[in-house]
Image (cartoon, rainbow, N blue to C red):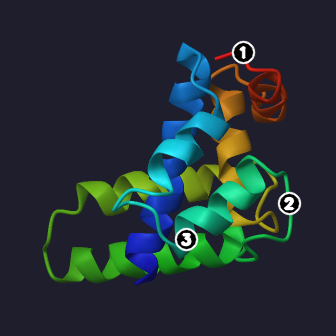
Amino acid sequence: MNFISMSYGALFSEAVVLGAKVGISPQTIRQVISPSRMGCGFFETFMGYVVDRNRDSHKFSIANAAKDIRYLNNMADQAEVMGVMASAAKHYYTHAEATGHAQDYVPMLSDLVGALNGIDMAQAVRDGEQGKD
């Protein structure tokens, strides 16, 4: 379960950053995804931080996410299973830990991915509130 959810965390982070980079606000992404089949509890709490900036909407630390993804990658290695998605997710969480964000919560990964791409996600939300998408 955590493999899937932590991978969603990395994927959602990339999606909102890409959206912001091309002019699609996090609010619009939420409006499109929430009522669709892809809308789920994880997405809602994740976006509770991204859009509402509610720090406590999804309280699962990056340190715990990184640990779980490392376990998964180790299991895949021992089973000799190529795990491209698991490896990609691992790199995001490892980077977050290495840059001092281990105690941040998983949705805050979106801010880190944003920074890696020259996007201030809090500003992207403010822009979305002003209808700049």
| Residue contact between numbered discs 2 and 3, judged by CB atoms under 8 Å | no
User: Which mark's residue is nearer the viewer, 3 or 1?
Assistant: 1
The answer to whether one can see residue 113 in this image is: yes
| Left or right: 97 as drawn, with respect to 11 | right
Secondary structure at numbered mark 1: loop
Measure the alpha-carbon separation of dots 2 and 3.
14 Å
- Find residue 132 and name its label: 1
Can you identify the residue that label 3 sits on?
42
> Which amino acid, by three-letter code, is at mark 3?
Phe
**Quadrant of residue 39 within the rendered picture:** bottom left
| Residue contact between numbered discs 3 and 1, judged by CB atoms under 8 Å | no
Measure the alpha-carbon separation of dots 3 and 1.
26 Å
Secondary structure at numbered mark 2: loop
| Left or right: 120 as drawn, with respect to 18 | right
Measure the alpha-carbon separation of dots 1 and 2.
22 Å
- Disc on the earlier residue, 1 or 2: 2
Bin the neighbour count of mark 3 within 10 Å (Cα to Cα): few under 14, some 14-19, many 20 and up.
some
| Left or right: 65 as drawn, with respect to 71 | right
- Find residue 107 and name its label: none
| Left or right: 88 as drawn, with respect to 41 | left
Q: Nearer the viewer, residue 4 or 29?
A: 29
**Quadrant of residue 115 within the rendered picture:** top right
Can you identify the residue that label 2 sits on?
54
Bin the neighbour count of mark 1 within 10 Å (Cα to Cα): few under 14, some 14-19, many 20 and up.
few
The answer to whether one can see residue 70 in this image is: no
> Which amino acid, by three-letter code, is at mark 1?
Lys
> Which amino acid, by three-letter code, is at mark 2?
Asn
Query: Percent from the top left, x then y, of residue 84?
Result: 25, 54
